[in-house]
Amino acid sequence: MQCMERSVCFLSWSLIVGGFLYFVRQLKSHTEYGRYTQTDAPRMMVPAKAAWFLQELPSFLVPVFLLLTTDTSHGLGRSIHLWTFCLHYFHRTFIYSPLTKGRPCPLFVMVSAAVFCSLNGFLQGHYMLHCAHYHDTWHTDVRFIMGERIRTYGGMFRWVSGANFFGEILEWCGYTVATWSLPSFAFAFFTVCSIGPRAYHHHKFYLEKFDNYPKSRKAVIPFLF
């Protein structure tokens, strides 16, 4: 299969525009899942474990399917990046999902997330397998090294309320630097726009609920926001 450049470009910019619009929406009201779910509302709900599993699964299955059905030579750079993406969602699907103790998720939210994960899984997988080109020494390139270092940064709950969100943002920003591609940038941008405001809502919730909550702690970016 050849690189579908127009589809890659269209999906990438769709993520960027969609991320911005979602960011604006969340400034007005947060998405109803997790602690913000209105359980008394008349809607179909999905248990948290099942919701997380079903919505995250396409991000693992789609690129793995593309990987198993392509005849192209993968190369070291593309293989490292693609398997890094797949391993992340293997963990989210098969390890994190069974352990989560969250609240039931609205069916609409789960389906929307599954559609997003399917499209993004195809975008990242197809780009890496059929569009990306990395030289044989890419693993020694400063962009790859810096990107991998950013991805491993963690342990920030002392400084920010949404340390898990901060870690997720750093991970995909690091992935963007390491892969140096429009699709990965689009995904990282969407991630910032979607979970950044959620971290802010969490932080606001903690400040209102707990009188002794540290006032110096920030929402998602240490020392800044």
Image (spheres, helix red, strand yellow):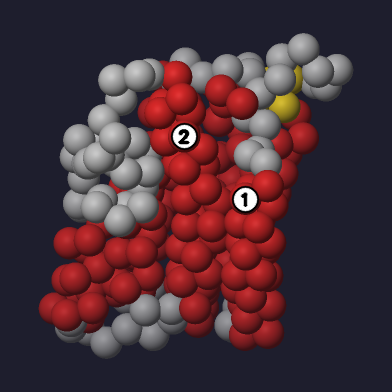
The secondary element bearing badge 1 is classed as helix
Answer with the quarter of the image where residue 114 lies: top right
* Residue under pointer 1: 27
Between 53 and 25, which is closer to the camera in this rendering?
Answer: 25
Q: Position of residue 110 (x, y in %)?
A: 68, 35
Between 186 and 132, which is closer to the camera in this rendering?
Answer: 186
Quarter occupied by the N terminus: bottom right
The secondary element bearing badge 2 is classed as helix
From this view, report whether residue 194 is shown above or below residue 2: above
Name the residue furthest right: 42
1 or 2: tag closer to the N-terminus: 1
- Distance Cα–Cα, label 1 vs label 2: 13 Å
Q: Position of residue 177 (x, y in %)?
A: 32, 73
| Left or right: where 106 falls relative to 26 | right
Q: Count the labels in the image.
A: 2
Answer with the quarter of the image where residue 199 lies: top left
| Left or right: where 76 falls relative to 2 | left
Residue 204, numbered label: 2
Q: Amino acid at mark 2?
A: Lys
Q: Position of residue 33 (x, y in %)?
A: 63, 29
CB atoms of marks 1 and 2 within 8 Å: no
From this view, report whether residue 163 is shown above or below residue 13: above
Between 92 and 128, which is closer to the camera in this rendering?
Answer: 92
Does residue 10 appear anywhere in the picture? Answer: yes
Mark 1 burial class by Cα count in 10 Å: few <14, some 14-19, many 20+: few
Name the residue located 17 percent from the left edge and 71 percent from the top edge: 145
Answer with the quarter of the image where residue 53 lies: top right
Name the residue located 24 percent from the left edge and 52 percent from the top edge: 223
Q: Amino acid at mark 1?
A: Leu
Residue 128, numbered label: none
Name the residue located 63 percent from the left edge and 48 percent from the top edge: 26
